[in-house]
Image: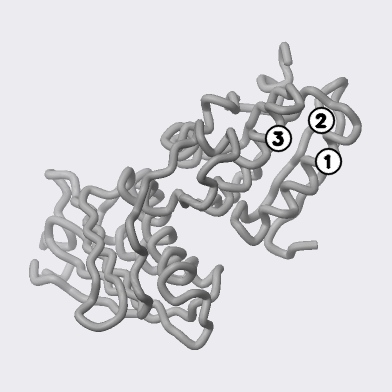
Amino acid sequence: MNKDIDITISQQGDVSIITIKGDVTASTGEAIENAYQDVSSSGTKKILLNFGPECYINSGGIAALIGVVSESRKKEQIIRATGLSEHFQKIFNMVGLTKYIQIFPSEESALAGF
Amino acid sequence: MNTITNEAKKIELHIPSILGYEKVAMACVASVAKNMGFNNARIEDLKSAVAEACINAIVHGNKMDSGSKVGIVVMIGSLSLEVYVTDDGQGFGEIIMPEIEEQVEGKNRDRGWGIFLIRNLVDEIKVEKKPNDGNVVKMVFRLPKKTFFMNEV
């Protein structure tokens, strides 16, 4: 367990929700990857990344998320995200993650029509 | 309110080359930037850019040698904030910008996003080699034209 990150997994219908609180960095990338593998092992095709309001995301975390995106495309999964601050929405867009992960303003809106 | 001259003010700190300590530099520059009148969105840009420069210095410059320090110098000007991040390493080598399409396909994953983010978040960036060993990353953040920093009576 990594003290810099708190990850919980839940299920809403056929959507697997990975809730991430804390740091999304190179140090916590493995924990995120493990959570992704956990939900993927159940065969899910829809994943929602729910970021906490205090999330700190840096380049190492972006690399980890790109790894998850890469795996998800092989498994034909769809990933959505919510909870990102305006700043990190901008970073996702800057890097190009929004080409692969659609961002929603709330969990409810992310789950709607998923 | 006391009048403070427009002469640049300097703040210097040193952090160990351990990931996580970049947050100390982030907190410092955020506090300075807030006093200077930068808006919240720009402060977030500044925090991310400074974090990335520190992470580069820790990982690529000082090779995670916890005995080596990363230096952060903050120069407060009337029109801009300049941040210098220094390490004692051998240099970053050629910096090639990453491409997400390639990385999603599993290619060139070793190309990090740090310098890419800094370039997109700051008004000016310069990466230079120090005369002896080490690198300096200079970042400039300009104040919006109508902002006056601690300069009004």
A92 left or right of B94 in image: right
Q: Is residue A50 above or below residue B129?
A: above
Spot occupied by residue B21 in the image (x, y as percentages of width and height)? 51, 72
Q: Which quadrant would residue B57 be assigned to in this image?
A: bottom left
Label 2 vs 3, first from the N-terminus: 2
Residues indicated by labels 2 and 3 sit on the same polypeptide chain: yes
Residue farthest toward the bottom in the current orientation of the protein:
B67
- Quadrant containing the N terminus of chain B is bottom left
Residue at label 1? A9
Between A100 and A75, the one lying in front of the other is A75
Q: Mark 2: few, some, or many residues within 10 Å (few <14, many ≥20)?
A: many
Label 1 residue SS: strand
Residue at label 3? A71
Q: Chain of mark 1?
A: A
A28 left or right of A8 in image: left
Please name the amino acid that badge 2 sits on. Answer: Ser
Residue at label 2? A16
Is mark 2 in CB contact (under 8 Å) with mark 1? yes
Label 1 vs 3, first from the N-terminus: 1
Q: Distance between the Cα atoms at labels 2 and 1?
A: 7 Å
